[in-house]
Image (cartoon, grey):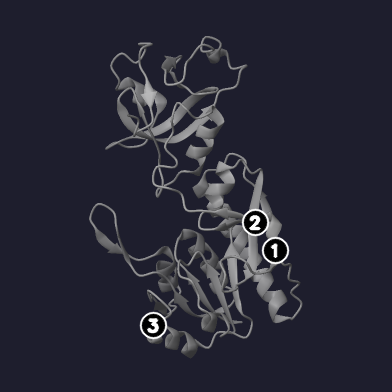
Amino acid sequence: MRVVFMGTPDFAATVLEELAQHHEVAGVFTRPDAIRGRGSKLVASPVKACAERFDIPTFTPTSFSDPEAFSSLVELDPECICVAAYGLLLPKRVLELPQYGCLNVHPSLLPRWRGAAPVERAILHGDEETGVCIMRMEESLDTGPFCVCRTTLVSDLSATELSDELANLGAQSLLTALIHVEAGKASWTSQDESMVRYAEKIGKHELDVSPDDYAMTAVRKVQASGPAHAARCVIAGRPVSLLKIQKVSGDDPAVRGLHDLNPGEVRYVQKRLFLGAAVGVIEVLSLRPDGKHDMDAKAFAAGIHGIKNESLTWSAPHAS
């Protein structure tokens, strides 16, 4: 099938790479190059980089209200438009252009987690499973019916790991959907509006970790964090990004002496770093102090004077 692909981040690049090996991708639409990194250099999106490897023409409009952008799309004459984490809304005239419509690879079990941050919201809310749906796009956000839906367990995967898994699952699901759609055998399931949950964008400080958090809440915040949204706190006066933590179980021998650990207190026991939470105890496994590289708890503790001093504390990064 002759398709046009629209997407931007790594998730979408994974889908494009698989799609390009099985279908004729006439063109790719992605967000414009953006300034990233300390060097403030313009960097192409992962999708643009992938398209260039396959020698696929790339377009980077800022809006489809631009006549030139729409004209370019029309000239490509797609039978279907495939979308994954693009970042631009598609107007009605774009949705109605291809013979087989526009298919979106959405990383959630619709209608749960419509919107911008479905992977992170699934983790933060403790969902046991999530998945991908191949949805026929409508003018409203993520409201269309779906023809393929596949699930996977969330377990203890980070947001990045889970997104990678869903991208691979989504790529295979899209190929299946295209076969069914082209053959006229796709079975569409309408979304149950009574079951809708919205996955709002992650707020700037939403993943900050605080002694007021339950231990399990803190674990989920760290699990949902990533390059765009860090899980921040201050340990013994050192601002850090938490990379991996765990809730300590009651039968852990190291915790037997920590039953009286109050929220905000720090303990370093048997070369393990523990933080008192509102309910439960957190163990820090790895972290990144500001201005330094990733390290484990032992390496971090080695740089703190008086780490075994029971008067050390931790706090949220913006605590008053």
Q: Residue 66 carries which label?
A: 3
Describe residue 46's horizontal placement relative to residue 281 as left or right: left
| CA neighbours of label 3 inside 10 A, class few (<14), some (14 to 19), many (20+) | few
Image coordinates of residue 148 in percent, x first then y, are 70, 65
Of callouts 3 and 1, which one flags the residue occurring earlier in the amino acid sequence? 3
Q: Is 311 or 156 nearer to us in this picture? A: 311
Image coordinates of residue 63 in percent, x first then y, are 40, 76
Answer yes or no: do the residues labelled 2 and 3 have beta carbons within 8 Å?
Answer: no
Q: Please state the total of marks drawn on the protein image.
A: 3
| CA neighbours of label 1 inside 10 A, class few (<14), some (14 to 19), many (20+) | some
Q: Is 277 or 181 nearer to us in this picture? A: 277
Tell me where residue 50 sits by quadrant. bottom left
- Separation of marks 2 and 3 at Cα, in angstroms: 33 Å
Q: Is mark 3 on a helix, strand or loop?
A: loop
Image coordinates of residue 239 in percent, x first then y, are 32, 32
| Residue that mark 2 sits on | 196
Amino acid type shown at disc 3:
Asp
- Separation of marks 3 and 1 at Cα, in angstroms: 32 Å
